[in-house]
């Protein structure tokens, strides 16, 4: 039997990533619980910022810090 899913295809202009990401978020928010998505985005962005800050700490450039930022970004992509 056919499976029907609403899908959103995305092409981003990487010369203006913030505007593009805002448009994508707005498109998703039209179809999903507003608060749940914004809370999760807030959490993931906060984690990425914290990981980046740790990467730029006195241990800058350490492999552990690089792995931590990559892990946060990968988790956000899921």
Image (cartoon, helix red, strand yellow):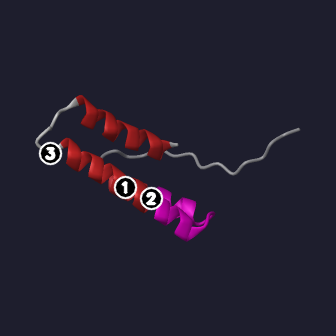
Q: Position of residue 74 (x, y in %)?
A: 43, 39
The quadrant where residue 14 appears: top left
Identify the residue at image location x=42%, y=59%: 43
Residue 52 visible in image = yes
Q: Position of residue 44 (x, y in %)?
A: 41, 54
Q: Earlier in the sequence, mark 3 or mark 2?
A: 2
Instruction: State the separation of the CA atoms marked 3 and 2.
Output: 24 Å
Residue furthest toward the bottom? 35
Q: Secondary structure at mark 1?
A: helix
**Camera-nearest label, 3 or 2:** 3
Q: Secondary structure at mark 2?
A: helix
Identify the residue at image location x=14%, y=38%: 59
Instruction: State the separation of the CA atoms marked 1 and 3.
Output: 18 Å
The quadrant where residue 33 appears: bottom right
Residue furthest toward the left? 58
Identify the residue at image location x=59%, y=49%: 8
Q: Nearer the viewer, residue 48 or 19?
A: 48
Q: Which mark is residue 57?
A: 3
**Camera-nearest label, 1 or 3:** 3
Is 73 placed left or right of 51 in the picture? right
Q: Which mark is residue 41?
A: 2
Is 65 placed left or right of 6 in the picture? left
The answer to whether marks 1 and 2 mark residues whose Cβ atoms lie closer than 8 Å is yes
Q: Position of residue 1 (x, y in %)?
A: 89, 38
Q: Which residues lie in the magenta part?
A: 23-41
Q: Is residue 65 above or below residue 29?
A: above
Q: Is residue 62 above or below residue 39?
A: above
- Residue at the disc numbered 1: 45
């Amino acid at each position: 039997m056919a499976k029907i899913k609403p899908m959103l295809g995305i092409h981003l202009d990487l010369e203006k990533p913030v505007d593009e990401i805002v448009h994508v978020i707005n498109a998703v928010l039209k179809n999903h619980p507003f608060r749940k998505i914004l809370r999760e985005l807030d959490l993931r962005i906060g984690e990425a910022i914290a990981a980046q800050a740790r990467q730029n700490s006195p241990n800058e450039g350490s492999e552990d810090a690089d792995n931590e930022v990559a892990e946060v970004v990968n988790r956000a992509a899921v």
